Amino acid sequence: MDTKVNDQITDAVTQANVKVVGESPAMALGNVYQAAAHSTGLMFQNAVNAQNQQNILAQAATTQGVMQIYSLDTVSDAIAIAKMLNGNGG
């Protein structure tokens, strides 16, 4: 059985196939660009988070240092009082 297909139909199918094949490199490159943009965004988010954590750590260290500086008087007073109470004199 020999069936003849209209030339307009074969042309339409051929053009659709050519369109899909022609668009595939652009789609692939678009996916590459999207992946690169996403990974760059994650990199910047991680950098900001690390900087934030370092700032918190620096503030905690500064607070500890200031607390130690302010507690020197009370420590020396406590040692002197303990010596007096134990009878070790001064």
Image (spheres, rainbow, N blue to C red):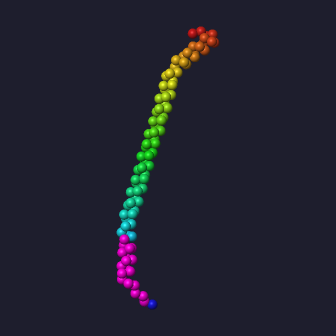
Q: Is residue 21 left or right of residue 83?
A: left
Name the quarter where the C terminus is drawn: top right
**What x and y, as percent, mark residue 57?**
48, 34
Q: Is residue 75 above or below residue 9?
A: above
Report if residue 6 lies within the magenta region.
yes
Q: Is residue 60 left or right of residue 17?
A: right
**Identity of the residue drawn at 40% across and 62% down:** 28
Front residue of 28/5: it is 5
Q: Return the residue found at the far bottom.
A: 1
Name the quarter where the N terminus is drawn: bottom left
Secondary structure predominantly adopted by residues drawn in magenta: helix
Q: Return the residue found at the far right.
A: 86
**What x and y, as percent, mark residue 80?**
57, 13
Q: Is residue 37 above or below residue 1?
A: above
- What residue span does the magenta drawing correspond to? 2-19
Q: Is residue 71 left or right of residue 14?
A: right
